Image (cartoon, rainbow, N blue to C red):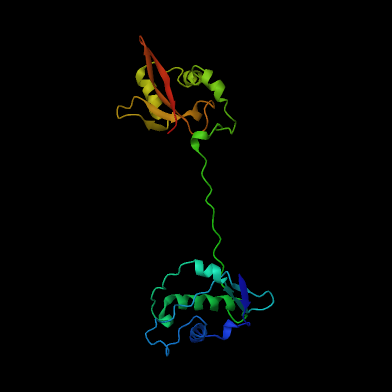
Amino acid sequence: MASEVLPVVDLRVLAQSDLDALAAASLHAVAPRSCPDAAPLPPLKIDRAVFNESAGYRKQTFSRLRFAAAASSSIPTSPSPITPCAGNNPENHLVAYHLRRFFAREDPSCPPSTPPPPETLALSSPDPDRETTNSKRVSVDLVRLVGLVDPYGEELRRQTAGLMSEAELLDFINCLEGQWVSQRRRRKFVDAASFGDHLPSGWKLQLGLKRKGRHAWVHCIRYVRL
């Protein structure tokens, strides 16, 4: 593969019509006078593989790649599709627009472009189901908690000491801050931290009455995480 380097061309002084004229001057272009029925020139496209920026200048150098005759003859060629007029092709305007932006970066008279606003990374909220510390910020021993039969029973008996009737016990549950399980208002979800630090923060106790004969007391039915 041979490479022919053409003279340096300053694209800053070239208009779209100049680019079309350069394309028409190519060895591969068809002269309109010699072939009136020839299709219009295809839109000018810049191949980045052979479009290199000089290190010391804001100018561009073009190189034309010529393949060996044997290689070119072995590859079948397909006719080029008919394209609209090169001057009205939107791709040409897009190329010219990006070229103007490219050279304007070094022009001190152009106002600096506004940098995009910094992106704010949203921090993921902690998973409440993975919380293992109690209201005192002490890590809960979950293995030990599984082995406890009724960790809140002693504190419930202490706070309800002296309450004998079911009406008094239900009034005690009614005074606690929480959420009733049903409209019957017999069981209620209350904060577990009000009766101890055995469970992690955010857990609730479902309290209700338990009866044995004529005796009744406030009982923790289960632990829930609402």
Q: Which residue lies at the image location 52% right of the left edge and 20% below the top edge?
A: 146
In this view, which residue lies farthest toward the top? 213
Image position, residue 88 (x, y; %): 41, 81
In this view, which residue lies farthest toward the left? 183
Image position, residue 53 (x, y; %): 63, 74
State left or right for residue 214 relative to residue 48. Answer: left
Which picture quadrant has residue 32? bottom left
State the count of labels.
0
In this view, which residue lies farthest toward the bottom? 33
State the residue in front, 111 or 101.
Answer: 101
Image position, residue 71 (x, y; %): 54, 67
Q: Which residue lies at the image location 38% right of the left edge and 21% below the top edge?
A: 168
In this view, which residue lies farthest toward the right? 56
| Quarter of the rendering occupied by the N terminus | bottom right
State the residue in front, 108 or 216.
Answer: 108
Which picture quadrant has residue 6? bottom right
Q: Is residue 111 at least partly visible in the picture?
A: no
Q: Which residue lies at the image location 43% right of the left edge and 89% below the top edge?
A: 34
Check the image and report above or below for 224 versus 98: above
Check the image and report above or below for 68 versus 16: above
Q: Is residue 71 at least partly visible in the picture?
A: yes
Image position, residue 184 (x, y; %): 30, 27
State left or right for residue 9 relative to residue 171. Answer: right
| Quarter of the rendering occupied by the C terminus | top left
Q: Which residue lies at the image location 41% right of the left edge and 24% below the top edge?
A: 207
State the residue in front, 67 or 92.
Answer: 67
